[in-house]
Amino acid sequence: MAANPWLLDPDRALPAEPTQRAIAREIHDVVADLPIVSMHGHIAVETIRDNESFGDPAELFVIPDHYLVRMLVSQGYRHNQLGVAPVDPRAGEPAEADHRKVWRIFCENWKLYRGTPTRYWLEHELVEIFGITQVPSADTADDIYDELLETLARPEFRIRELFDRFNIEMLSTTDFADSDLSAHAQLAAEGWGERVVPTFRPDALFYPDREQWGRDIRSLSARSGVDVADYSGFLEALRERRFAFAAAGARASDHGHVSADTTPLDRPDAARLFADALNGPLAPAAAAAFAANMLFETARMSLDDGLVMQLHPGVQRNHSEEISRVFGADKGFDIPVPVEFTRSLQPLLQAYGLEPRFRMILFTIDETVYSRELAPMAGVYPSVRLGAPWWFLDSPGGMARFRELVTDTAGFYNTSGFVDDTRAFASIPARHDLSRRMDAGFLAKLVAEHRLDIDEAIETAIDLAYKLPLQAYARLDA
Amino acid sequence: MAANPWLLDPDRALPAEPTQRAIAREIHDVVADLPIVSMHGHIAVETIRDNESFGDPAELFVIPDHYLVRMLVSQGYRHNQLGVAPVDPRAGEPAEADHRKVWRIFCENWKLYRGTPTRYWLEHELVEIFGITQVPSADTADDIYDELLETLARPEFRIRELFDRFNIEMLSTTDFADSDLSAHAQLAAEGWGERVVPTFRPDALFYPDREQWGRDIRSLSARSGVDVADYSGFLEALRERRFAFAAAGARASDHGHVSADTTPLDRPDAARLFADALNGPLAPAAAAAFAANMLFETARMSLDDGLVMQLHPGVQRNHSEEISRVFGADKGFDIPVPVEFTRSLQPLLQAYGLEPRFRMILFTIDETVYSRELAPMAGVYPSVRLGAPWWFLDSPGGMARFRELVTDTAGFYNTSGFVDDTRAFASIPARHDLSRRMDAGFLAKLVAEHRLDIDEAIETAIDLAYKLPLQAYARLDA
Amino acid sequence: MAANPWLLDPDRALPAEPTQRAIAREIHDVVADLPIVSMHGHIAVETIRDNESFGDPAELFVIPDHYLVRMLVSQGYRHNQLGVAPVDPRAGEPAEADHRKVWRIFCENWKLYRGTPTRYWLEHELVEIFGITQVPSADTADDIYDELLETLARPEFRIRELFDRFNIEMLSTTDFADSDLSAHAQLAAEGWGERVVPTFRPDALFYPDREQWGRDIRSLSARSGVDVADYSGFLEALRERRFAFAAAGARASDHGHVSADTTPLDRPDAARLFADALNGPLAPAAAAAFAANMLFETARMSLDDGLVMQLHPGVQRNHSEEISRVFGADKGFDIPVPVEFTRSLQPLLQAYGLEPRFRMILFTIDETVYSRELAPMAGVYPSVRLGAPWWFLDSPGGMARFRELVTDTAGFYNTSGFVDDTRAFASIPARHDLSRRMDAGFLAKLVAEHRLDIDEAIETAIDLAYKLPLQAYARLDA
């Protein structure tokens, strides 16, 4: 072990300027230990139900983390070298089986993460959660691997035990529309029903240009008990599933469309497109029109079941067809595209935007819409809330720019508070803590510039960290 | 009254960092008391002519302020609860008649404005202008209401008396093309002709897709004394009105188009569209082409009468048709859209951009064009000046980003200095003071980084606060 | 001479806040004297070969510098007043022959440059390189002119002597595809072959809508020795020239396209467009399709010769046809337009993006793509590096925003390090020094916020200033 153990500064990510740092520290002290409300994420519910060990260090930190993997790929490593298996063993070289080697690649390349949120999250995880005392490097890789291996095998490092240690009050998973929700039911039977809830994600059903769409429709049919022979049956089956999710505790639906278009189709047109799709994949333009129509229909349905509607548009998935074919989805090759909200959301907001029983939470990776479109809409439509900085923007700079660009027009109280959107369970406390630090820094600047009183800043920080996420994701059928 | 009276810090909105704050304070001290030049705003000229009282607190602060109203609407209040009357009594519930109740809603929701410019402006108005000593809240609402009611009734709080107190040297109203300018004439007769001037706003006539267009053309015909039977008559009538405005002291025309397109039409095409429009509303695309053509014609006309041309593009008006139908225009539901200047302005700038007797001031709510399009154009075309951050961007952050994004390429001397663009007379000193503070902060950073000397910074601050607005809006026919 | 000589603060452009400044100074001290690697610029190779004097002050500082000239034009000066000659003596008024008058205009307008990078560069040049001790003004213009005239005549102020004084290790010129490379050959014969290298710039050949395209094709034919009678001959001639450039030491090709489109054409379609173009200029859309195809072909060719591919898209050249007709290209009237990378580069990256022997360096003047498109692509494709802030963004603010917006997702090691892209030889040290200061400031903020250790920051600063440019522009056929 090194002479100087690895320590994290208690003031990390707070403003460097001393006046603002002192104020930010005062604010952060109040919110640091508030419970975590994690209303949108991608932890598989089965891992919570089964409460298994996280495996070895490569399995926990490297292989499933697309932020971390993509940075190594950008410097010439191949996915399989990093332990990522090809989807079909014939499609590519096999994954590196020696996970110690995978871990070494990561440690040797620690410097690539300088200045990135991955660096920040991993420091927090390794030091604060797993007690590592050496900085990753070629020299320390093996020591750290051994130490982590031992730690991860201990029962207090299983996921449910960490729920308590992390002070997670509520966590939402993301579940396909045809999910049987059995894992959620089992958790509910064990008293975890309020703590782990599902989210309804029907994207696969809304894009009928996908090869697997017909299969997914049959699965929906089977799960819902509704014969999905036409568009009416489709809407009925969706309604059934939404109520099933709501009954299982769901607070929200989630929609990862390419564009934010919400133009409804006339009923006969929608029915015709649906009928066509049953005969084979639609052309992309027709599929996009159908998807836009389904966002409109989703808003309408939410008036009945109270699910909050989340929209995550603007990503071109699988930018490299080769990576997609060999290694599958979510491997770091999703690239943002420009997105437009003002005109795209108008049909939906004309119909439901003033409706007290409708709520929509908007996310973006295109920062140009913050001050131009999102803040002006959230600052007037009672149904609209702005989600937290998403994906590539879930970073110190991304968070600072979000508050800077939306607060003037939308204030704090039309935002959702922090949403972590992570696949990496162990990173949840780091992500929430970083958000609390960045908001403390933003509020501290307002206080230091005499634009806000310290007691107002503290109340606002508590709201952003804890109360607003609960309010934003509260079902509206109550 | 509270034990601790509400006081505003003299250093508010200056940089938090002590070195920069000290420099900024030194700069601000020099510009704080310079006269106000308010060259683009929306105060009704009749209110100045009649010099009536501002009414009660809700009538002054809440009901007419779309910034303030929209924030309350975003949290679920309805316009009529806030005292906003439906345009047609049959169209919606009547406005709350008890303005004390309206005022209470505002005070109870004071926290919504945290971090917004509305908060900053209202603090300045309530404390500095009206002597309020309690922070708005449910508890203080009635006290403040009573105190304001009494204050607003005093003769020294009428608009013309406040002109002197606010040190307003010149203020421009915005007037429809068919305005008779009689209120301006009366003010001139009372010696206020140099102090209050009109601005020529012909938008209504340039968009022949509007139902009321034919009526507006007849009104133009009547007012100008030119028979507007065809496109030639239309141009002649516009010319007449522009000269009438110029004779009444106008410095500028103003154009609130959806896009910045300035493509001219061939004369026969323009004439044909105009003839079609006389028979009924044009299709949107044809109307847009006509509007673009009229921007080009406006530049041509300005060579004769010297009016400076202001362009405010990029807003989708009346995003909610329901709000528009029930409560009318300017109720907070105008939402920005992306805007493009480089290609859109090329036809106009090809023709007149190098003309010494032409000047155009460009505004935007889409910040993406600052460094990409506006600064590069203003930094080379002698006719182009950049207006101040507009509407949702008229905020501490918006002002900071404006200077940050345009100064590299356009410098300070291709910008117009501050333009308040407000409907709220009592907010004018607050808005100008905030601008002077933010520019002082920006200049202080340059000084602290040894990129500018303090005497240069002070001279620049004086230019931005006072001299540049006068220069930018000086008529070019002199 | 003034009582107080003009001195530049050693801490200029470092952060104002004392904690960060101290750290930034520590970092900057380490990188300040590293050799300069200038891998993309527009110094004419003949001026290096001939090692002539720079002429008079107007010839060195004013006339050829489009940054400087455009600012004076924006305030009403005409190009010819500034010593810029019309391309055809009949096309416009002659250039001012008295260069002392030109110099006076510049000095009298020194204040226009406040807050701009031109001010920063010129201060550095005048004070640090040429020993000027008076600030430019109407009063000092003649003194400074005389002093500079004398200095510039001294042998140690010729370009090759300044190479040593500036510590330039390697400099790349930009050369037309049909260049005979003889000046480079002469420099090589004198032992300067490693120090001055060419860059292959074929834009003129890729846009067959240009009047001169046929002439350029004939010139290519003559220079390459390949009969360019059809598309196959065209590709063969390009290949020949690329190898000739590579043999002359070239590291890269450079492409200044309007858009970033890389869609390949089917071979017969490309051949047909080429044949059409031989008969006369193509329509703009066809020319754009051909240009996109040629970017794709360029990537393919680079696998054979190892030249790194630079892309500089998104500028509308010659926005004012009048200026272009009278004074020619590069006179300050090039204006950026919005640019899109994600979809535009997909065809090329699908084909070659994972190829270890391909490298592409991306530049932009549209800052909206930094966090949305460029950082996500550079952060995963091993072939992609992000170039330094370009043109209007080569400024303190532009550099700060670049690091702020790309580091989260791309880190430091997917960027190219500094690229100066200048026509002004004497500004090279100023530009590199400014970049080193700004990066030191950015790294210092990370250190002060406890997000990076000081030793990591210093190593990163050395990489950004020196090692990464060498790596990014290393040929890949080695």
Image (cartoon, coloured by chain):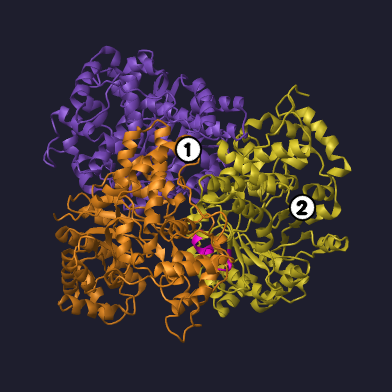
Chain colours: A orange, B purple, C yellow
Residue C379 sits inside the magenta stretch: yes
Disc 1, SS: helix
* Residue at mark 1: B400
* Residue at mark 2: C168
Residue type indicated by callout 2: Ile
- In the picture, measured across the screen, residue B61 lies left or right of residue A228, that is right
| CB-based contact (under 8 Å), mark 2 and mark 1 | no
Residue C78 sits inside the magenta stretch: no
Residue type indicated by callout 1: Ala
For mark 1, does the 10 Å Cα neighbourhood hold few (<14), some (14 to 19), or many (20 or more) residues?
some
Q: Dividing the picture into quarters, in which one does residue C20 lie?
A: top right
For mark 2, does the 10 Å Cα neighbourhood hold few (<14), some (14 to 19), or many (20 or more) residues?
some
Establish whether labels 2 and 1 are both on one chain. no
Look at the picture and state if B90 lies above or below C111: below
Q: Nearer the viewer, residue B109 or A347?
A: B109
Can residue A295 be seen in the rendering of this structure? yes
Chain for mark 2?
A: C
Span of residues in magenta: C375-384
Separation of marks 2 and 1 at Cα, in angstroms: 37 Å
Name the disc covering residue B463, or none.
Answer: none
Look at the picture and state if A200 lies above or below C99: below
**Residue A35 drawn at (x, y percent):** 29, 52
Residue at 53% over, 74% down: A101
Residue at 76% over, 57% down: C170
- In the image, farthest residue toward the bottom: A90
Look at the picture and state if C68 lies above or below C223: above
**Residue A455 drawn at (x, y percent):** 32, 34
